[in-house]
Image (cartoon, grey):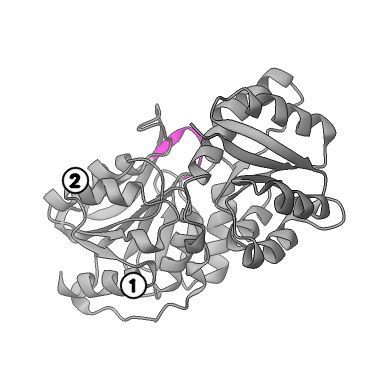
């Protein structure tokens, strides 16, 4: 089997060598080159033609985000960003990166090696199968839509993984202040979800925040499940929707899990909900979306042509969970159309 050729772009010699040693231990990966800055990286790309590049955001001579913006139009390739806790990572995703991992704030070698083995290697393998031509489709402008009285007092639930930060952003940009309450689970490391929520809040018409137990799900508002060791569930208490964020084991390898959110929406909202499953590897959310559809909810899956990774939506579609399969640019419009008929 052909190994995945990886280029490492990292200015720290210690971390760079640690990456090389640990990635090369995997039988499916081969580090073909390393680079200390974007200029060395450009030369290595031309010479070695890597399948995947890992990229630090903070680099000498040119930062990683600027490098991505210059690189992707000429040499589109899967990029996994390695970032400290900073909202700059979302600029990197907007510039065309496939995914990101949080660089551990530790100097302990065994913990760093555990991070590489359990997180980075998984992301590299997923990135190697990503559809890079789809990473920039979110740049398309969304039309604004309006909600009739029929569409009020409903719930919109969204789940996504790889490529999902930009996909969710694109869908939400198509929502107006009249959209019913939105709840979303995006697979993301702890700490980043609060920054992501702020970014959506600043750049959309919705009021967006990282969810806490007891938060009410209000029209024109969006709650995002916090990354870490807790799942977010929808509850209906005295006729009012609210969320519960509670610690629990991983489901489908994820915490928070899309399946956990969708299952709770099926139970609490039933036919008064629209479920949306977006780009991502694996099958998290597929069974939950099926539970929503069986409970009478309307369901939407992102189509293959606009997914960065057509994994989660495909599994959901194959299960019969997806009622409407749509291009990313059409999902907001479909959501409004369904709400207006409910």
Tell me where residue 271 sits by quadrant: bottom left
Principal SS element in the magenta part?
A: loop
- In the rendered image of this protein, does residue 219 appear above or below residue 88? below
Q: Secondary structure at mark 1?
A: helix
- In the rendered image of this protein, does residue 73 appear above or below residue 176? above
Residue 248 appears at what percent x and percent y?
40, 28
Q: Find out whether residue 236 is within the magenta segment.
A: no
In this rendered view, identify the residue nearer to me: 226 or 338: 338
Q: Is residue 179 visible?
A: no
Residue appearing at x 48%, y 50% in the figure: 130
- Residue picked out by circle 2: 319
Residue appearing at x 65%, y 49% in the figure: 49
- Residue picked out by circle 1: 330
Density class for disc 1 (Cα within 10 Å; few <14, some 14-19, many ≥20) is some
Tell me where residue 180 sits by quadrant: bottom left
Q: Dividing the image into 4 quarters, which one contains the C terminus?
A: bottom left
Left or right: 174 in relation to 286: right
Q: Secondary structure at mark 2?
A: helix
Q: Which residues are magenta?
A: 226-231
Residue lying at the far right in this picture: please name it. 61
Left or right: 50 in relation to 215: right
Residue 146 appears at what percent x and percent y?
31, 81
Q: CA distance from mark 1 to mark 2?
A: 22 Å
Left or right: 96 in relation to 291: right
- In the rendered image of this protein, does residue 10 appear above or below residue 19? below
Query: Which numbered disc covers residue 65?
Result: none
Residue 25 appears at what percent x and percent y?
62, 22
In this rendered view, identify the residue nearer to me: 12 or 152: 12
Q: Earlier in the sequence, mark 1 or mark 2?
A: 2
Q: Find out whether residue 230 is within the magenta segment.
A: yes
Density class for disc 2 (Cα within 10 Å; few <14, some 14-19, many ≥20) is few
Q: Is residue 64 visible?
A: yes
């Amino acid at each position: 089997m052909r190994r995945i050729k990886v280029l490492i772009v990292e200015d720290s010699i210690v971390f760079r060598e640690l990456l090389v040693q640990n990635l090369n231990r995997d039988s499916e990966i081969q580090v073909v080159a390393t680079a200390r800055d974007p200029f060395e990286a450009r030369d290595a790309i031309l010479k070695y033609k890597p399948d995947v590049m890992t990229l630090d955001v903070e680099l000498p001579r040119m930062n990683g985000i600027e490098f991505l913006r210059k690189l992707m139009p000429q040499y589109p390739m899967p990029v996994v960003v390695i970032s400290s806790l900073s909202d700059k990572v979302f600029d990197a995703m907007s510039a065309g990166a496939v995914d990101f991992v949080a660089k551990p704030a530790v100097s302990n070698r065994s913990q760093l090696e555990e991070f590489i083995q359990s997180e980075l290697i998984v992301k590299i393998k997923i990135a190697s199968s990503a559809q890079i031509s789809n990473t920039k489709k979110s740049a398309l402008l969304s039309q604004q839509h309006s909600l009739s009285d029929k569409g009020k007092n409903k719930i919109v639930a969204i789940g996504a993984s790889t490529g999902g930060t930009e996909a969710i952003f694109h869908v939400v940009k198509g929502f107006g202040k009249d959209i019913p309450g939105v709840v979303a689970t995006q697979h993301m490391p702890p700490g980043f979800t609060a920054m992501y929520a702020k970014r959506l809040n600043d750049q959309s018409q919705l009021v967006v925040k990282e969810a806490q137990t007891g938060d009410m799900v209000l029209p024109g508002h969006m709650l995002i499940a916090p990354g870490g060791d807790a799942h977010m569930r929808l509850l209906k208490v005295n006729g009012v929707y609210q969320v519960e964020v509670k610690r629990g084991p991983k489901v489908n390898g994820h915490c928070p899990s899309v399946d956990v959110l969708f299952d709770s929406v099926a139970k609490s909202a039933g036919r008064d909900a629209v479920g949306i499953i977006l780009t991502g590897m694996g099958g998290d959310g597929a069974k939950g979306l099926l539970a929503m559809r069986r409970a009478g909810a309307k369901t939407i899956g992102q189509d293959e042509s606009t997914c960065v990774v057509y994994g989660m939506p495909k599994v959901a579609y194959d299960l019969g969970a997806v009622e409407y399969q749509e291009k990313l640019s059409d999902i907001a419009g479909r959501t409004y159309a369904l709400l207006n008929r409910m």
